[in-house]
Image (cartoon, rainbow, N blue to C red):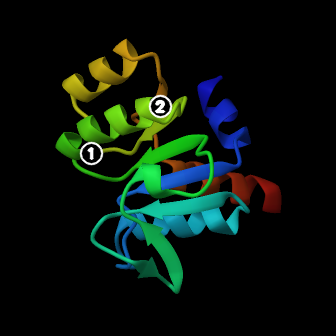
Amino acid sequence: MIKEEMLDKKVWAVVGASPNKEKFGYKIWKKLKEHKYETYGVNPNYDSIDGEKIYPYLKDVPNKIEVVDLVVPPQVSLDIIDEAKELGIEYLWFQPGTFNDEVIKKAKSLGFKILYYDCVLATLIRLEKSRSN
């Protein structure tokens, strides 16, 4: 299943990473790190979050990204799809609110393996709970 494939990948980028601890761009970035994923924040509006470097664009990340988690409006997602394709990234995880029909259609037409109508934060929290039982 696509979700398990994605969760097996170790290098993630969170597009829309935010220093605001109340926003999903922060919570998701932090939760991926807690789960030992090599996680890069991508947001042209910030240089760092919690003392860690944040990159303006996917192309600026110094490592090969395996999964892009999007926490941005659909219009931004459309641009990110193009950049991800240029970089040869295979997996895109669209958080709720980051996509519309146009975004999903474009991602599918370009051959990405995608996940949407699902939240990586909720998934990782469920994993934590199942491991602690």
Residue 103, can we see it?
yes
Who's the residue at 52% across and 30% down the image? Answer: 88
Q: Amino acid at mark 1?
A: Gly
Query: Total number of numbered labels?
Result: 2
Q: Amino acid at mark 2?
A: Leu
- In the visual, does 97 lie left or right of 36? left
Label pair 1/2, CB-CB below 8 angstroms: no
Image vertical order of residue 17 relative to residue 8, above or below: below
Between discs 1 and 2, the one toward the N terminus: 1
Who's the residue at 50% across and 75% down the image? Answer: 53
Circle 1 residue? 97
Where's the C terminus, which quadrant? Answer: bottom right
Circle 2 residue? 115
Q: Secondary structure at mark 1?
A: loop
In depth, the one of 90 and 27 nearer the eye is 90
Who's the residue at 55% across and 70% down the image? Answer: 30
Q: CA distance from mark 1 to mark 2?
A: 13 Å
Image vertical order of residue 74 relative to residue 71, above or below: above
**Few, some or many C-alpha atoms within 10 Å of disc 2 (few <14, some 14-19, many ≥20)?**
some
Task: Pinpoint residue 106: horizontal percent, then vertical percent.
Answer: 29, 21
